[in-house]
Amino acid sequence: MAGSVVKQTGGEFLRFFVVGVGATLLHLGVYWLVNWLFSLGPANALALTASYAVGYLVSFVANYVVSLRWTFKTQGSMRKGLGFAFAHAVNAGMHLLLLNTFRVLGAGDALSLLLIWLTPWLVECLPVLGRPESLLPLPVYLIVVPVNFFMVRFFLKKD
């Protein structure tokens, strides 16, 4: 019985990871697009936060639909939708708090310098990767993804 739960949770986490990668790429794509369209840089803290939130909202909607139907293979309900929204509200708060904490600490600058030093060819091919504000979400994701899995699983699997 315990092995079955571990196997089920492992499969769910793998699907969650795949969906999360897609949602993350969608989130980053919207964030980068908005930053590019409005020429936002590190000095525009409020605008960067807003563009990050817009990307999060777009990925949230897509994530909910796919999480229900594929990741956790369950039907939607008002209760599950509200639980998912609550989990993601907490998640969004963590994202924004950590994004701005890492911005103040200069994590984006450190990551961009490291990336330029380690893979100058990659930054040359994709200049967006050399911009500190473009890399700020990376350490955020390392913290919030595992926390979010357990919160979302709790709300979507709970009957």
Image: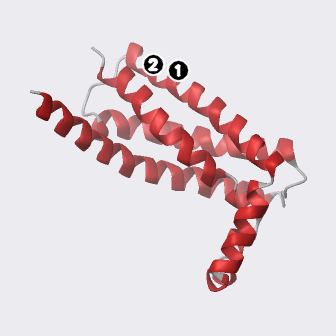
Where does residue 2 sit, x and y in percent of width and height?
14, 28
Mark 2 neighbour class, 10 Å CA radius: few under 14, some 14 to 19, many 20 or more: some
Q: Amino acid at mark 2?
A: Gly
Foreground residue among 93 and 61? 93
Which residue is painted at 31% across and 46% down in the image? 15
On screen, 7 above or below 39? above
The answer to the question of whether label 2 and label 1 lie on touching residues, with beta carbons closer than 8 A, is yes
Query: What element does badge 2 sit on?
Result: helix
Quadrant placement of the N terminus: top left
The residue where tag 2 is placed is: 83
* Observer-nearest of 53 and 9: 9
Side of 74 relative to 106 (left or right): left
Mark pair 2, 1: CA separation: 5 Å
**Eyeballing the image, is 125 above or below 147?**
below
x and y, in percent, of residue 131 in the image: 76, 66
What amino acid does circle 1 point to? Phe
Q: Residue at x 47, y 17 (%)?
A: 82
Whether 98 is drawn above or below 103: the answer is: above
Figure quadrant of the C terminus: top left
Left of 64 or right of it: where is 144? right
Q: How is the image coloured?
A: secondary structure
According to the picture, the residue beneath numbered tag 1 turns out to be 86
Q: Position of residue 21 (x, y in %)?
A: 45, 53
State the image quarter where residue 149 is shown. top left
Of 121 and 41, the residue lying toward us: 121
- Could you say which disc has been placed on residue 41 in the image? none
Could you tell me residue 37's position as x and y percent? 78, 60
- Residue beneath the point at 65% across and 51% down: 137
Q: What residue lies at 69% left-to-right and 39% top-to-bottom?
A: 98
